[in-house]
Image (spheres, helix red, strand yellow):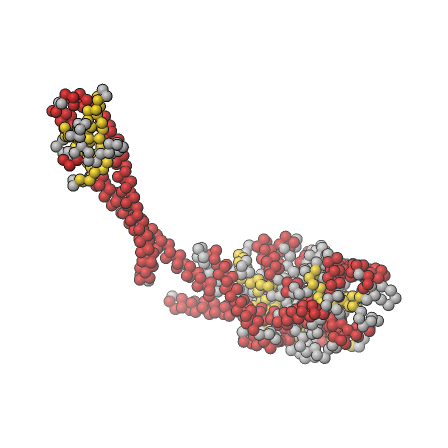
Amino acid sequence: MPTRLFRLSLRFVLPLALVLGLFAYAVVPLVDNLTVRWFVRDLDTKSQALANALQEPLRDYVPEKAERRINQLFERALRDQRLYAIAFCDPAGTVLYKTSTYPQTLGCRLGLDNATGKDSLVNFPQGPLHVSDSRLESEGQHLGKLILVHDMSFIERRSADTRKYVLLLFALMALVISMITVFVAHLSWRDWIASVKSILRGEGDDESGGHAPRLSTSPEIRPLEGELRALLHELNVERQTRDDAAHLWTPEKLRTLLHEELSGDEVLVVSNREPYLHTKTRNGIEVQRPASGLITAVEPVMRACSGTWIAHGSGSADKETVDSNDRVAVPPSNPSYTLRRVWLTKEEEQGYYYGFANEGLWPLCHIAHVRPVFRSSDWEQYEAVNQRFADAVVREARTDDPVVLVQDYHFALLPRMVREQLPKATIITFWHIPWPNSESFGICPWREELLDGLLGSTILGFHTPFHCKNFLETVDRYLETRIEHESGTISFGGKLTQVEDYPISIAWPDGDANLPTVAECRSSVRAEHGMSHDHLLAVGVDRLDYTKGIIERFQAVERMLELHPNLVGRFSMIQIAAPTRSSLDEYQNFEARVKALVQRINNRFGNGNYLPIILKAEHHGSEQVTRYYRAAEVCLVTSLHDGMNLVAKEFIASRYDDRGVLVLSQFTGAARELPEALVVNPYHIEQSADALYRAVTMPEIEQCERMRSMRSLVKDFNIYRWAGRMLLDAARLRQRERVVTKIRSHSRKSLRRVV
Ligand code: F6P
């Protein structure tokens, strides 16, 4: 340690001493010069005054040649200790009178410049002398000149003194500055090193939701801390992305990741909607797959990972198909994971699902100009149901540190509730809908409670960086937290939540070779609707939801037919609209408006056999939907606001023929990833109409180029990658948590031993 300090000191002191030495070397002559000039000027003035004083008596004595008096006068003047000698010269240049000290060699001219009258410095063996002369006249007659010689050796002495003091001052300064520098540098260096090391080790990060108190970093490094973390984070992401890009994400790869990185840790999914509903029909119990982007995305992940999916059992035959623990193995055809159903009463479903989630949070988070409604009774049900699902998670967990994947806005409070019971759990919450700006979110009377609930998560995922940013700003505004915006981490109550964007996707279809081909779909769908083989077809697939821009889409169809009447009779749009949340007024009104609009447009442009818009307001299975995707020239996705929108990706995945055009709303998360689509503002009816026209008339070669590019993106950035990235992040955080726990218990043991 002392050697290090010595080395450190040398490293600072030597250069500093060198710099100061050089400085002094340049400064000393300057100071010398300046001092001489000051003294010379001083002597000039003094000589002038003395000459004036001597001239008066000399005017009398010189003509009288009163040598004795002149010598007395000179001797008196010499009492001034600095005056060294005096002489008087006649006009011919002969020294007439002089003091004994007057240098012989000086004569009457040496050192004098009569032309300019300037005084001079002359060097003599006894030292430098200052010589000045003044002309003596009496009544216009030139009597001679008086020469005064001052001793300048005191200047040399003073210069030497000044030099000594200047050097001493610089040496002292060098010493003090270097000591201070060394001291400060030493302190900061130790802090910096410690802080940087702790950041690099990820200590105090505690993103895994553990309970490590945050390590305090030195104040000097604090401004850089975020950047360091962000840098590390970027490196991690970059490394992961490189890994990702090198391999196609498949169910096998996800399985391997789960076993290798998470050592087969238990995975639990929680969502409101269940992946399989059992419904009673006339033909007995049937299994249905709900129209839900969430289910489309998460179900393949669960098939790959196994585990337990906890969801609301809402099918009419659900109760009849579960075991005594409310569990059923799914998928029914090839079971690979467990579905655990939670039963809700009508009141609970009304308050929690229809009320708080869909009349409150849904319009709150979507900019679709429908006002959210918040009721205390709904909130109470929302809290109670979140608690029931949280309890179900805890009951289903076989270990104390499961990986819990919480889905969507129905369960904002659940992460905190699970965290309280399973502190070691890794909770990954994914918010499938947009997150609004902080001001909009502030409308919610229970905004703090919702944020607090979500911050029970280890990782909180959104589709886009923009939604992450909105979330961070909302937390910043309504909760007392510490946020690192660069790395997306929130520290709240000693725990960390990592906020990250994970754009959701679909499973790339590999096993659909048994589905009808594009040609078969084209002809069968056209035949079914009485259309000619070259009839142009657009398709829309949505839940009948006001956020989907269905009305705007139909208005665009109408406008296109107005602008291009040659398409009337040659173009139709098939809209598949799965009924949803139909018990809510807003949805009933919306359905009525959609139907009325379809009727008006069909009346305007249709005739007996021809309908410009065919509305199929009923549930369609995925194979039926794929048939329409393949039959159509165009797929229209015109959401007014959408987290991601998986219809866009499903359409792309179904077009193995590299044909078909996607018209895509700029207000979907998908638009960020798919610029090759015809991206539109759905509120701008003419723009959408133009895009639709461009789509139906697009040359095949252009369709092909765009579609190929989109297909390769969706294939690579598939749902296994989405889940894989989140699980990889979780694995990293769990690993870190385990190491930190080990270190802590080790240091506790060592401490006990010492005590
Ligand atoms: O978009 C949000 C979401 O939860 C989706 O994940 C899903 O597609 C849709 O809402 C389903 O809504 P619901 O379950 O209310 O029918």
Q: Quadrant of residue 310?
A: bottom right
Q: Quadrant of residue 271?
A: bottom right
Q: Would residue 163 be seen by someone viewing this image from the given angle?
A: yes
Is residue 146 left or right of 385 when viewed as pictured?
A: left
Q: Residue at x 22, y 30 (%)?
A: 133
Furthest-right residue in this view: 608
Is residue 496 left or right of 347 when viewed as pictured?
A: left
Where is 181 relative to 415, above or below?
A: above
In percent of width and height, residue 638 lies at 72, 62
Near-viewer residue (378 or 605)? 605
Give the quarter the ligand 1 occupies. Answer: bottom right
Near-viewer residue (486 or 77)? 77
Near-viewer residue (153 or 244)? 153
Q: Residue at x 61, y 75 (%)?
A: 250
Q: Locate the C terminus by quadrant.
A: bottom left
Is residue 288 left or right of 43 when viewed as pictured?
A: right
Q: Residue at x 60, y 77 (%)?
A: 252
Furthest-front residue in this view: 92
In percent of width and height, residue 195 lies at 44, 60
Q: Would residue 590 be seen by someone viewing this image from the given angle?
A: no
